Image (tube, rainbow, N blue to C red):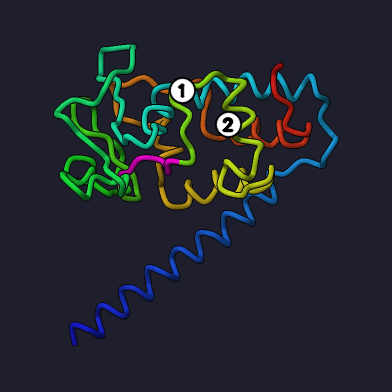
């Protein structure tokens, strides 16, 4: 009986993930703009806004190197610093080797509570894959990384939009960056503004500042 329930639970989970992927593709297709329909100048302006989002502590603090030491910006502070309590993500990037990130950052689709309650998301709390390091990098470096499929998870311009929509379908980290709980700073604009800018940037050929 228990085994049957586990199988059903796994099947339901897999179905939910697949449904989320399909939904994300459909949503991303609606976001896509025709290639070349946006000028390079407009694309660079869109990148400036994207850069302001991805370099904001709410987005950059978990995009750390292989040492897997998270960065945080406590409520009431403006500068990022090493996460307190000697937290370490480990090779797993989820803290499995010592204390799992989810010990404090619960997996939940509920709205985040005001600081100092730890923020949460609809997927397990974790550091970004080590390939996606960009904490401390310049905007130009991050731009070159995001448009390079070898360094962004194999995604083209449309794939980046699918990534945003898929994460949103799971109540993931990206949309929660704009809803971290009262008392915490947020990136400029909104999640939908960010999606539109990524679409503009993609239609312009993903130009980067020189």
Q: Which residue is mark 1?
A: 187
Q: Is residue 49 above or below residue 104?
A: above
**Pointers 2 and 1 in contact (CB under 8 A)?**
yes
Relative depth, front residue between 37 and 207 = 207
Q: Residue at x 45, y 20 (%)?
A: 136
Q: Quadrant of residue 195?
A: top right
Is the N terminus in the top left, top right, bottom left or bottom right quadrant?
bottom left
Which quadrant would residue 66 be assigned to in this image? top left
Whether residue 109 sits left or right of residue 160 in the image: it is left
The boundaries of the magenta stretch are 125-130
Q: Would you say the magenta stretch is mainly helix, strand or loop?
A: loop
Nearer to us in this view, 9 or 47: 47
Point out residue 41 in the picture as x, y percentages from the top left corner. Answer: 79, 19
Left/right of residue 47 with respect to residue 42 in the rendered view: left
Specify whether 184 is left or right of 100: right
| Residue 173 x/y as whole percent | 40, 40
Residue 126: say if magenta: yes
Residue 140, x across and y down, in percent: 62, 21
- Residue for point 54% across, 59% down: 21
- Local packing at callout 2 (Cα closer than 10 Å; few below 14, some 14-19, many 20+) is many
Q: Earlier in the sequence, mark 2 or mark 1?
A: 1
* Residue of label 2: 194
Circle 2 — which element? helix
């Amino acid at each position: 009986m228990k085994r049957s329930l586990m199988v059903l639970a796994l099947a339901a989970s897999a179905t939910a993930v697949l449904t989320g992927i399909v939904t994300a593709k459909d949503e991303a297709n609606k976001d896509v703009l025709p290639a070349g329909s946006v000028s390079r100048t407009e694309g660079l302006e869109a990148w400036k806004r994207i850069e302001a989002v991805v370099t904001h502590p709410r987005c950059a603090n978990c995009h750390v190197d292989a040492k897997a030491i998270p960065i945080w910006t406590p409520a009431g502070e403006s500068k990022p610093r090493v996460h307190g309590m000697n937290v370490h993500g480990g090779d797993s990037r989820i803290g499995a080797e010592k204390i799992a990130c989810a010990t404090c950052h619960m997996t939940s689709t509920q709205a985040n509570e005001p600081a100092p309650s730890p923020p949460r998301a609809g997927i397990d709390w974790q550091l970004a894959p080590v390939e996606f390091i960009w904490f401390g990098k310049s905007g130009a470096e991050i731009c070159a990384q995001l448009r390079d499929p070898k360094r962004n998870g194999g995604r083209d311009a449309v794939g980046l939009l699918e990534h945003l929509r898929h994460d949103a379908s799971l109540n993931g980290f990206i949309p929660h960056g704009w809803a971290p709980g009262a008392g915490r700073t947020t990136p400029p604009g909104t999640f939908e503004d960010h999606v539109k800018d990524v679409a503009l940037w993609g239609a312009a050929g993903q130009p980067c500042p020189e």
